[in-house]
Image (cartoon, helix red, strand yellow):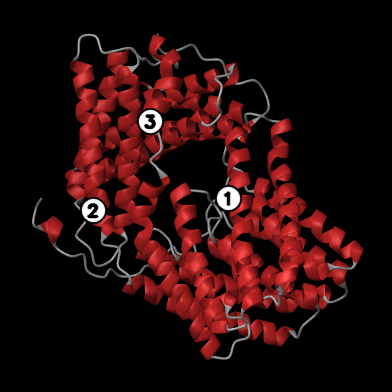
Amino acid sequence: MSSAALSPTPARRLPLAGVLRVGRPSDIWFKPALSVVVAVGVPNLTLLALGRLDLAMYTMAGSLCALYAHNLPYAARARALAWVVLGMLASVAVALVTASLTSSAVVLVAVGALLAAAQKALCDATRIGPPGPVIFAFISSASLFAPQTLGQVPGHLALAAAAGAWAWLVGMAPGLVRPHGPERRATARALNAAAAYAEMFVETSASAAESAETSATASAGRDRARAAGAAAVHAAWQSLFATGARSEPRRALERLVVRAEIALAAPADTDAGRLRSWARDLRGTGPVPSVEPASAADELLGVDAERAVGRRPLADRLGPLLPLALRTALGCALAGYVSLALGVGRPYWAIVTAASLYQANITLTWSRGVQRVVGNLVGVLLFAAVAPLAHLGPAALVLCCLAFNFGAEALISRNYWLGSICVTPMALLITEFTGFQRPGELMTDRIVDTVVGALVGFAAAVVVTNRRAGDRIENALDTVERAREHTARLIAAERPGPGALEAARRGLAAALVELRATADAAAGEWWQRAVPTERVLLAERTGHRTLATAVRRQGLHVLEGKRA
């Protein structure tokens, strides 16, 4: 290892430009938005009719589970949503039992911080997001500070469980109409990403010869586009692997993903327009575009590819997340205690603010903090404007909350701060389910807790360093090199075993995707060994060249009109 790789990375300038930039919405933003309205609306309107809106906090615990797993195929979504509901019930159970046993705010804050840390680690390890651990932290922290007796806990948990079951049904319902919708969308993203790389490759190849500077810029742009394409293809395979039996629609989707892989391997020979046309056809409800197999190996993809990318045990995935869990525990605890010291009546808002900040590295955590503060401050102003309407009666209060639920999911994929504009008044209105309160006091508490949570939470991220990020890069580099060498040996073999080259190619592709994600995370971390950028780029380029060679060795060929 070079000496540069051992030198510590100093603190970088924290970005401001672009932090609040509004992007394009998610292609499925309406799915969580509509699902949460239905999942929250039915229980809340039922409680309103019964005159027990004070119990809405417990049904919200189950209802908000409808926000999860919209990117997963329905077979995997059924399992994931069930685990989300069980995880939410476990969090609420711990919170309610704790609240019934003690009224000490110091103890409640400590338990809230530990819960937030556990939720962060488990959500990141299982990659159950978005929205990740924030919803769990919001519900469990609020439950800690709800007046409770031990005898009430079973009934309140039953309400949460019933609402969770309803949320599960809401999340699964679209599968009755479009059973392969998630896989189709994932395949369409892969095709579009591969088309974008092919177009960039052709455009930059012509301009790169003009100067060395232009060539370097073009090469960097192609590397980014290729990495994005590889990640999209990998995500498409993961989606297909989760579907279980290989039905004919799944086989057709597999063949389209193979086309995306071919485009990444041979961008100069790719008809990007054809890829985009297939992607458009997948967006609707019509049949999956029929594509001839690229080779005999195409029929072996399912079993071999799934074997090549088997998931690591949960314990192994939790290990590297320990620094993030420590950050979360320390930041949430300190934020809650500072809020208590300032006399704020709802310290759980400070806990949730701190918990919402922690991303893969310090730079992203800073960006999330800025977005959270800006969104919450604007959201407080929106609450001030809406409060008179919401206070017209309980029905108006419920309808306003539903509107903000929809708005939050409609906007949050454009930028986190836009979603926070709706989340903030929604959270303030939820506190009024037990009775209307003075808006000025609620707004003051929210502002103070937001600022405290953001400042203290970020300070904890700076204090708790993540020196494991450098180790993870080294491990990822080693994994890529081993996968590349294994693939190269099979390419050179006269007759590799049935499916062996395909499995090796898929393993190398997965290792390259993981290397890029690990390098991006480490690049924004402070006080660690310098990221070996040149080694990462070299590993990526040689790895992708090996993938392209494997494609040619397998006999996969372009069928988009340029070659027969």
Q: Quadrant of the C terminus?
A: top left
Q: Is residue 404 left or right of residue 104?
A: right
Distance from the alpha carbon under mark 1 to that under mark 2: 35 Å
Mark 3 residue crowding within 10 angstroms, few (<14) / some (14–19) / many (20+)? many
The kind of residue on which mark 2 rests is Asp
The kind of residue on which mark 3 rests is Ala
Mark 2 residue crowding within 10 angstroms, few (<14) / some (14–19) / many (20+)? some
Residue on which the image places disc 3: 198
Exactly how many numbered labels are in the figure?
3
The kind of residue on which mark 1 rests is Pro
Residue on which the image places disc 1: 25
Q: Is residue 365 left or right of residue 344?
A: left
Q: Nearer the viewer, mark 2 or mark 3?
A: 2
Residue on which the image places disc 2: 471
**Residue 282 location, quadrant:** top right
Q: Residue at image x 56%, y 77%?
A: 108
Q: 137 or 21: nearer the eye?
A: 137
Give the structural element (helix, strand or loop) at label 2.
helix
Query: From what the image shows, is residue 523 above or below residue 555?
Result: below
